[in-house]
Amino acid sequence: MLERIRLESLHEKVTTAENAVKLIKDGMIIGSSGFTKAGDSKAILPALAERGKTEDLKVTLMTGASLGHGTDGKLAEANVLKKRMPFQVDPTLRNKINKGEILFIDQHLSESAELLHTKNLQSIDVAIIEAAYIERDGSIVPTTSVGNSVTFAALAKKVIIEINTEVPEEVYGIHDIYQAEDYPYRNVIPIVAPWNKIGRKSIPVDPSKIEAIVFTNLKDSPADIAEPDEKTTAIAKHLLAFFENEVQLGRLTDRLLPLQAGIGKVANAVLTGFKDSNFYDLTMFSEVLQDSTFDLIDSGKLSFASASSITVSQECYERVLGNLSKYKDKFVLRPQNISNTPGLIRRLGVIAINTAIEFDIYGNVNSTHIGGTKIMNGIGGSGDFARNAYLSIFVTQAASKGNNISHVLPMVSHTDHTEHDVDILVTDVGLADLRGLAPRERAQKIIDNCVHPDYREELQSYFDRACERGGHTPHLLEEAFSWHLRFSETGSMKQKVETEVSN
């Protein structure tokens, strides 16, 4: 295993997770690798959770995005977390956040590293970085994600490295490690196509800061891949038909523009739909590469993909990591403040496809909170892309839970993406193209095309009565959240809930 530490002076730093975690003290700021379950800490953070069971210990934890192997839940259960940022998906952690027991900062994924470099966040005390191996110059060859690791390694006072022997050393070369200059000396980031590589292949770090090296041999947590169902298939068909029409109108070509898709079954279904389409030579400039990405590569539809992590099923993990020579020239992993940087998204003309929890009749989107108050996962990178994309698309089912919840409402209970940043809305019912429409036109387009039939008449009534009252963006404020209130009281957003009365 020492062959994976090519700087011999670091051999003496090898230790156990239990010893390494002693470097972490109460009140520290920890920066850990990990982006949507990929390339995360599999030894140190779980060991920290074990310490928390017997010690009074509180830390602030920053990562790239979510962690795998239930690590966030273990830390939350052990009461180790004082504050967490910028994204999470763990149900135990989510519950404690919503109870107010753990503070959570929901951040655009492009911003965390920027705020650290500009000293608008407290400095990192300890960085924990998963590596495939350590180069002779002490630099780190990361594994299946880059995330914020470049910034953490550069700014942390101390560094702990987890060398994961499950990851083949052949991952060398799949990463493009570039760090933009600090303000006011920042230069243009010279990426003009998804396949441009502008940086180095390993993460630079001062070897004198490396305090401990721990070996692990655990694969990333597999992604939960749900097969396309009736609703997600319908959404994909509406969206593909829209793209085909854009080609006919001369706005796009059969190659489209670089695609970005959020994680989850809807995005996966949309990308899977491209396999049987007429589009070809597609590219991606996204955050996460999912199973559908590599399926499209295998089908010949996708020629190149750029992101910050690989988050795939176990089968796909084995297929890709076990055959890197086949895929190595087809994708690249970058730091998330490069993969999500607004200027590049705008320059490349990215087509952004993200998931909404709900949207309203004017096109405002809630992608983070249930009922306006309870965090689900976080905004992730959807805002980075929505504001700057060539096309900003949000998708969701029209209704759920036996159609007792409408996902199209008079007013969203929490706004993550305003109507000004949303171009296209899609449900299984249909698609609304909002470009060039005034608020009243947008509302009618959404009601006609996206609303579940059970709710269309009531939503039309709301809009008509609001228009009679007047205003540029007509609303009945006394009714705007009545659907949410009705659901909390009756379990359904419908005006009349039919109940069976037994004799």
Image (cartoon, rainbow, N blue to C red):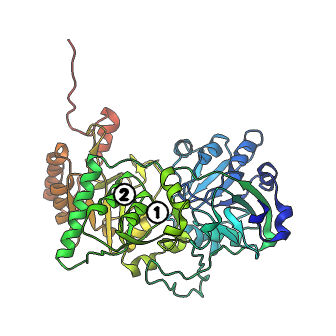
- Which structural element holds mark 2? helix
- Where is 168 relative to 403, above or below? below
Q: Position of residue 208 (x, y in %)?
A: 82, 71
Q: Position of residue 437 (x, y in %)?
A: 20, 70
Mark 1 Cα within 10 Å, few/some/many (few <14, many 20+)?
many
Q: Position of residue 234 (x, y in %)?
A: 24, 53
Question: Which quadrant is the N terminus positioned in?
Answer: bottom right
Task: For the residues labelled 2 and 1, say whether their Cβ atoms are less than 8 Å apart.
Answer: no
Q: CA distance from mark 2 to mark 1?
A: 11 Å
Q: Which residue is mark 2?
A: 267
- Where is 192 relative to 91, above or below? below
Q: Earlier in the sequence, mark 2 or mark 1?
A: 2
Q: Which residue is mark 1?
A: 289
Q: Position of residue 357 (x, y in %)?
A: 36, 51
Q: Which amino acid, by three-letter code, is at mark 1?
A: Leu
* Residue located 27% across and 38% down the image: 404
Question: Which quadrant is the C terminus positioned in?
Answer: top left
* Residue located 57% across and 50% down the image: 68
- Where is 278 relative to 86, above or below? below
Q: Nearer the viewer, residue 139 or 25?
A: 139
Mark 2 Cα within 10 Å, few/some/many (few <14, many 20+)?
many
Q: Which amino acid, by three-letter code, is at mark 2?
A: Ala
Side (left or right) of 124 relative to 495: right
